Image (spheres, helix red, strand yellow):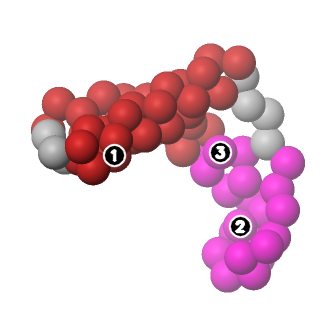
Amino acid sequence: MDPETIKILLDLLNPLHGEIDRQTYDQKVRENFDAPPDAEYNVDITARMERDLTQAVLILEDRLRQAKAA
């Protein structure tokens, strides 16, 4: 993947990752960061975060289609 695409994806995904991490930090500390894979957390996601996540997925899907076509 080219560096520009990687930067775009990081710009879209890092704020979402940080917010989820911030909201779940206390729960993860109590669980010693060793929660089972199916552990559930409740977090608040803004409309912008959801749009950014969707945009990142669309970019990845587009790059995958391009790679398969090449």
Mark 1 touches mark 2? (CB < 8 Å): no
Q: Is residue 24 magenta?
A: yes
- According to the picture, the residue beneath numbered tag 1 turns out to be 64
Residue 19, image quadrant: top right
The structure residue drawn at horizontal position 70% and vertical position 69%, both measured from the top left corner, is 29
Local packing at callout 3 (Cα closer than 10 Å; few below 14, some 14-19, many 20+) is some
Q: Secondary structure at mark 1?
A: helix
Highlighted range, magenta: 20-42
Amino acid type, label 3: Ile
Q: CA distance from mark 3 to mark 2?
A: 11 Å
Determine the image quadrant of residue 33: bottom right
16 vs 60, left or right, is right
In what element is the residue under mark 3? helix
Which label's residue is closer to the chain start, 3 or 2?
3
* Residue type indicated by callout 2: Lys
Residue under the image location 67 percent in, 81 percent down = 34
Q: Nearer the viewer, mark 3 or mark 2?
A: 3
Q: Position of residue 7 (x, y in %)?
A: 25, 34
Who comes first in sequence, dot 1 or dot 3?
3
Nearer the observer, 49 or 68: 68
Residue 35 is covered by the magenta coloring: yes
Q: CA distance from mark 1 to mark 3?
A: 27 Å
Q: Which residue is mark 2?
A: 28
User: What residue is pinned by disc 3?
Assistant: 20
Rendering coords of residue 31 (x, y %): 76, 76
Q: Residue at x 61, y 50 (%)?
A: 21
The residue that appears at 24% across and 43% down in the rendered structure is 69
Category of crowding for the residue at label 1, using alpha-carbon neighbours closer than 10 angstroms: few (below 14), some (14–19), many (at least 20): few
Residue 33 shows which numbered tag? Answer: none
